[in-house]
Image: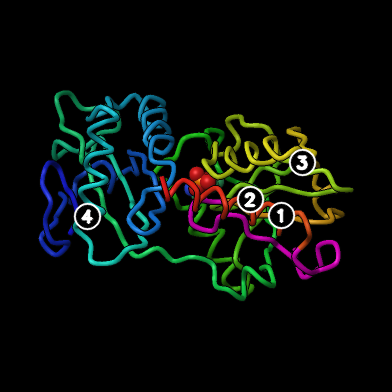
Amino acid sequence: MLYLNGSFMPAAQATISALDRGCLFGDGVYEVIPVYSRHPFRLEEHIARLAASLASIGLANPYAPEHWQSLVRQAIALQDYEDQSVYLHVTRGGNGERDFPFPDDVAPTVLINPSRLVMPSAEQKARGVSAISHADFRWLRCDIKSLNLLPTVLLREAARQADCAECVMFRDGMLSEGAASNIFVVRQGVIACPPKNHLILPGITYDLVIELARTHGLALEIRPISEAEVRSADELWMTSSTKEVLAIVKLDGQPVGSGAVGPLARRMDGLYQDFKHQVMRQ
Ligand code: PMP
């Protein structure tokens, strides 16, 4: 069951106009919320980021935060599995014309589609994953969680063809982020990540990792990171709502540090899991 424009219905009955601006132009934004044992994790933060993405593209938020939360909870309750990944998607709708400027008086398209949560496998957690690197050829508003995902499609396909889980991107010699994750490096016991700006998505997991590092007194620097620093790092992590904190142990075929999951990756994953379970018990 999914939610489309005001009602819950079976996926097979959910249809959107072929001339929806989401389909024609990718004119919309989205979110992905992890759900553990039917508890949505960091729901308020995801709804707030959706509001920010909508504001950035001049699309009026169709619902108040409390209504979004209620719809997400209803959608979760309707599924017959516990761990979910809830996809939210809002487009500028359509008026039957293919014209770039915003149309007048068009209702947005709102979709809420839960699916089964696919987490990293036990082996990926234990042994880490491999990544390739690539020039970041995306646009200059990567802070918006936009439906224009063609770069992500191409970058993740390149990673898949290289038998890798992620693609680490550099822009002008500096680390930006992963194709669908934020990237942290560890050098000499210090965790570092690039600052939030228009070149990266403000990750919900990124924020939580920073919060956990600060709460537990781990050394942390938020600053621009050069490609050379990434290539000589002791540890490299990717973070996202569905991958959580996952160690990258090989980059472009070269081992990262010792080539095994590092001590700080294990520590941060432990803190993350503890935090998650504590929140779920509340
Ligand atoms: N950057 C990009 C480009 C992403 O697609 C994602 C996944 N949403 C992230 C970072 C990580 O964000 P989050 O921790 O909110 O899932």
Q: CA distance from mark 3 to mark 2?
A: 11 Å
Locate residue 106, reporting x and y percent.
15, 30
The residue lying at 25 percent from left, 27 percent from top is: 64
Q: Secondary structure at mark 2?
A: helix
Q: Secondary structure at mark 1?
A: helix
Is label 2 in contact with label 1 (beta carbons under 8 Å)? yes
Q: Secondary structure at mark 3?
A: loop
Check disc 3 and report the residue beneath it.
Answer: 218
Q: Earlier in the sequence, mark 3 or mark 2?
A: 3
Is label 3 in contact with label 2 (beta carbons under 8 Å)? no
The magenta-colored residue range is 240-261
Q: Earlier in the sequence, mark 4 or mark 2?
A: 4
The residue lying at 74 percent from left, 39 percent from top is: 172
Q: Alpha-carbon neighbours of circle 2 within 10 Å: few (<14), some, or many (≥20)? A: some
Residue 271 got which mark?
A: 2
Q: CA distance from mark 1 to mark 4?
A: 33 Å
Q: Is residue 147 left or right of residue 134?
A: left
Q: Earlier in the sequence, mark 1 or mark 3?
A: 3
The residue lying at 62 percent from left, 71 percent from top is: 124
